[in-house]
Image: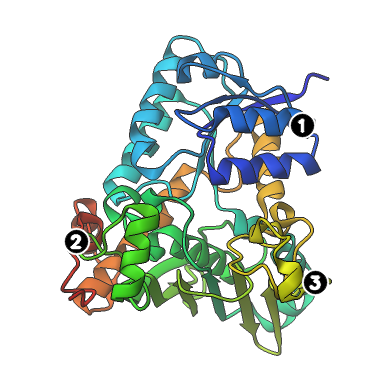
Amino acid sequence: MRPFKLGFIGAGFVAHFHAAALKSTRVADLAGVFAPKGADSLQAYAKANGIGDCEIYDSIEELCNNVDSVSIVAPNFARIDIMGAIADAVKKGAPLKGIICEKPLGRTLKEAKQLVEIAKQTKLPTAYFENQIHMKAIKSALKQLGPQQAAMGPIALARSAEEHGGPHEGWFWDPTQQGGGVLSDMGCHSIAVSWFVLNPLGTAPDFLKPVSINADVGLLKWGQPKYRKDLLDRMGVDYTKTPAEDFATGMVTFENPDTGQRVKAQFTNSWMYDKQGLRLLMDGLGPGYAFEVNTLKSPLEIFIGDEAAEACADAEMALEKATASRGLLTVQPNEPDLYGYLDEIEDAVAAFKQGKDALLNFEYGLEITRLCQAGYLSAETGKTIDLTDPKTDKELDSYVSLIAQGKAQEQLNVK
């Protein structure tokens, strides 16, 4: 059987993570890439690891004509133009079976709606890539607690945190390009996975209806003069002029439309977590039962002393966003599988082969964008946002946070 051919639009950090996930599955080959930079490196990685030829194409149209599905793993600010080019290729006869978009779907609700509308014009299935929902640890926890949920009732409180020391590239730090700070970058993960585990067994990922959100943000580390200078020197981003939040926390209330029961999702995210590296911490509490996931708990630990540390060239060989190359290191042997990248690829490919949307489609991504933007509105106004009020939807349709506009010096107390 001919392998399913994936094509990447973008060749940066997350593209390499998805490529690494393909080493653990044979459902698809990395057949091609279009990217302004990094394509050569991605192609070399693909060939060295036997995951596909990864031909380099000069245009999105050319890529679309030579693969079964394209995956948008390009920067947030380029998404609208990319989707337009994909739609144009499909109109001209490109034989695509589906379109994938890495989170977040849009920097604003308006952008996310544009992406949904362009995708509808293509009449193709879609997949919104939110990897944490696909984590084996999450799926195993829900399966193991199935009998308890059936007997005692669903999970009532979910808490999720994603934290690390900060992004790899300058555009991630620039709120005018990324769409915000850590809430836009990682809050989408935490809100989505909490919503997912709160849904009663057997229901859709958006079964529970959002009722309200209350959020707070801050610039706690990277607004200090020392770290502002470091950020400017390394990334070319000036947080005296265009600051973004490096900490976000909040609570989303959901309601079961059948029973009226309300449940809570608490999220916390930061770019100031300077321990072993990226940490995903999640738990769910139900009546008489609970689960907890902590990705810094690994069966493998390594210790490197000061003298031996000089031989280590790359701290991230141990863990994504690791900032140390000595001491006691947590090592995850297969991060792409741990974080759910492998499973979300398999889900999308299986769905596209059947002509269906993936578990999470662009419309779901739109709802996550709505919740994140409502979080920014809450933090900006100091109010709990009523998500059931039609006036909220109208306001969010044209809302661009002060942070995303690069005008949040006062809000984030930058002096």
How far apart, in angstroms, are the residues tagged by discs 2 and 3? 41 Å
Depth order, front residue of 229/246: 229
Q: Quadrant of residue 375?
A: bottom left
Disc 1, SS? helix
Q: Which residue corresponds to the image point at 49% horizontal and 28% vertical from the top-left?
A: 35
Q: Quadrant of residue 56?
A: top right
Q: Which residue is mark 3?
A: 302
Q: Which residue is mark 2?
A: 241
Q: Which residue is mark 1?
A: 48
**Above or below, 318 relative to 48:** below
Disc 2, SS? loop
Mark 2 crowd level (few <14, some 14–19, many ≥20, 10 Å Cα): few
In the figure, is residue 213 to the left or right of 287? left
How far apart, in angstroms, are the residues tagged by discs 1 and 2? 43 Å
Three-letter amino acid code of the residue under disc 3: Ile
- The first of marks 1 and 3 along the sequence is 1
